[in-house]
Image (cartoon, helix red, strand yellow):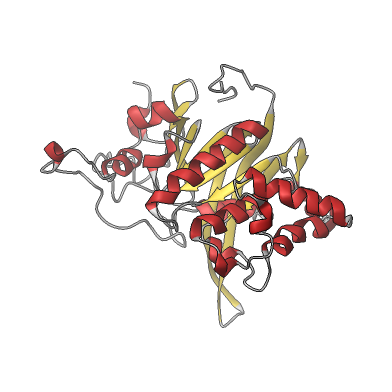
Amino acid sequence: MSEFATGDGVNTKDATLLSVRQLRTWFELRRWGLLKVGDVRAVDGLDFEMRRGEAVAFVGESGCGKSSLARTLLGLYRPTAGSIWIEGEDMAGFDRHQLHLYRRKIGYVQQDPYAALPPFMQVRRILREPLIVHGNRDREDQERKIRAALREVRLEPPETYLTKFPHMLSGGQQQRVVIARALILKPALIIADEPVSMLDASVRVEILNLLRQIQQQRNLTLAFITHDLSTVRYFANRIMVMYAGQIVERAPVDTLLDQPRHPYTQALLEALPDPDPDNAQKIRRLPKGEPPSLVSPPSGCRFHPRCPHAIKGLCEIKPPPEFPIAPEHGAACWLNQPS
């Protein structure tokens, strides 16, 4: 999977911004703070690339490792193994100063805007903080960039919002401030972790459209983390489906939504609400049980205890590789092995 064509038909081969290889982020479990009793395998062997200017959605149930992946890419968690290359540099070898510079390249849009904003700071101060942290001491330049960021996220006129505290803003306005803060350093990559899940339904489309417009105008690379497959068709170029810390299927968005080849992806699509009243009596074949423990995940295919198509004597024993199905489309399921 070395090439990706954007919606404009531009081949972005050799324009890789981020490359992840065999990434593992495990968290030690200790008894009484001393005796190690295991590891939580939140991210367990991920390989993928993200090209400049594309939006990639990482989807899956809660507990599949999406947010741990986001925090690892941000440099908040140090990877246990593997590598993260950004613009040709390996983050694993960064010292404290290099990590500081690395974080400038990445913006973060959190899930809960109210919790993400300091309640004792006005909007002006909230947006000034990242500029100060990264060495900008010019007050006039700071003010110019703050006002430009507010205009970009459609908080106009800026004077109306500069002196407000977070509790004085609506949920949608708070999230726009969070987006402005993520953009103010002009990052190359934006990580949006469930950016609309805490917002009213009427505001979600506005925020998604805003993110998409900014991403296209700036040619930003955007990692969109969500459990809601219903929004990604209009937002992402590619989808990567995660289960139990691993990627089980990846494909261009229309291909994956129209022709899913992993049983877990099919189950996620089956779980989407269907507005068609004619399908009210449709029997949905959803997987039984809960996602597995990341401390002791199942042997073989991690989805096999819940999979209605599991092959006895194979799926529970041998982990499936990712089988290529079509250009840019692969699924880690024994059902897709060539005959």
Task: State the image coordinates of residue 132 (x, y, percent, origin top left).
Answer: 82, 59
Left or right of 321? Residue 141 is right
Where does the C terminus fall, quadrant-wise? top left
Q: Residue furthest bottom?
A: 32
**Image height of 222 relative to 77, above or below:** above
Looking at the picture, tell me which residue is in the foreground, 268 or 149. Answer: 149
Looking at the picture, tell me which residue is in the foreground, 3 or 158. Answer: 158
Q: Which residue is rendered at x = 47% and y = 44% of the image?
A: 206
**Image height of 23 relative to 290, above or below:** above
Looking at the picture, tell me which residue is in the foreground, 261 or 62. Answer: 62
Q: Which residue is rendered at x = 44% and y = 30% of the image?
A: 253
Task: State the image coordinates of residue 328 (x, y, percent, origin top left).
Answer: 50, 25
Left or right of 71? Residue 105 is right
Q: In which image quadrant can residue 309 be found?
A: top left
Left or right of 89? Residue 76 is left
Task: State the image coordinates of residue 74 (x, y, percent, origin top left).
Answer: 66, 52
Q: In which image quadrant can residue 21 be found?
A: top right
Q: Which residue is rendered at x = 54% and y = 65% of the image?
A: 114
Q: In which image quadrant can residue 118 be found?
A: bottom right
Task: State the image coordinates of residue 94 (x, y, percent, origin top left).
Answer: 80, 51
The number of callouts visible is 0
Q: Residue furthest right?
A: 138
Where does the N terminus fall, quadrant-wise? top right
Confirm whether residue 285 shows in the render. yes
Confirm whether residue 259 shows in the render. no
